[in-house]
Image: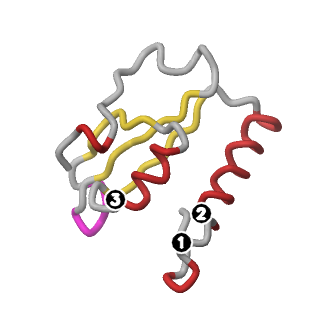
Amino acid sequence: MLVIEPEYRGQGIALSLVHLTIKTMEEKDHVDEITLETEVINLGALRLYESLGFLRTKRLYRYYLNTHDAYRLILPLSENSGKRIAFLPPLDEAVV
């Protein structure tokens, strides 16, 4: 889970942390893809992840304990990724 305190948002901290995580997973774990979930209403997180190449693959209804829906996002890192999955359109093209 990634959370940035409100007074530190907008400074690129989340972007740096996600970049570092992706790089580490690629170099040390040699992963084909990275998967995560975020709330449908968290537009900031969705924009951040989609700007890094993550693709929305599924809407998970009532996923969180607060009953909010989530999107599952996948970042394909190799040709082996995405062979068995369909991707949803980018956030700007879809209705939230």
Q: Which residue is mark 2?
A: 14
> Along the polypeptide, which appears first: circle 3 or circle 1?
1
Tell me the CA gap for discs 2 and 3.
Answer: 14 Å
Report the front residue among 71 and 16. Answer: 16
Q: Which residue is mark 1?
A: 10
Q: Label 1: few (<14), some or many (≥20) within 10 Å?
A: few
Which residue is rendered at x = 67% and y = 59% of the image? Answer: 17
The image quadrant of residue 55 is top left
Magenta-highlighted residues: 63-67
Residue flagged by tag 1: what amino acid is it? Gly
Residue farthest to the bottom, as pictured: 7
Does dot 3 land on a helix, a strand or a loop?
Answer: helix
Q: Label 3: few (<14), some or many (≥20) within 10 Å?
A: few
Is-magenta flag for residue 64? Answer: yes
Q: Which residue is mark 3?
A: 43
Residue 11 x/y as whole percent: 61, 72
Task: Decide if residue 27 is on the left or right side of residue 16.
Answer: right
Does dot 1 land on a helix, a strand or a loop?
Answer: loop
Report the front residue among 64 and 92. Answer: 92
The image quadrant of residue 32 is top right
Which residue is rendered at x = 81% and y = 35% of the image? Answer: 27
Residue flagged by tag 2: what amino acid is it? Ala
Residue farthest to the right, as pictured: 28
On screen, 75 above or below 62? Answer: above
Tell me the CA gap for discs 2 and 1.
Answer: 9 Å
The image quadrant of residue 93 is top left
Which residue is rendered at x = 40% and y = 61% of the image? Answer: 44
Q: Nearer the viewer, mark 2 or mark 1?
A: 1
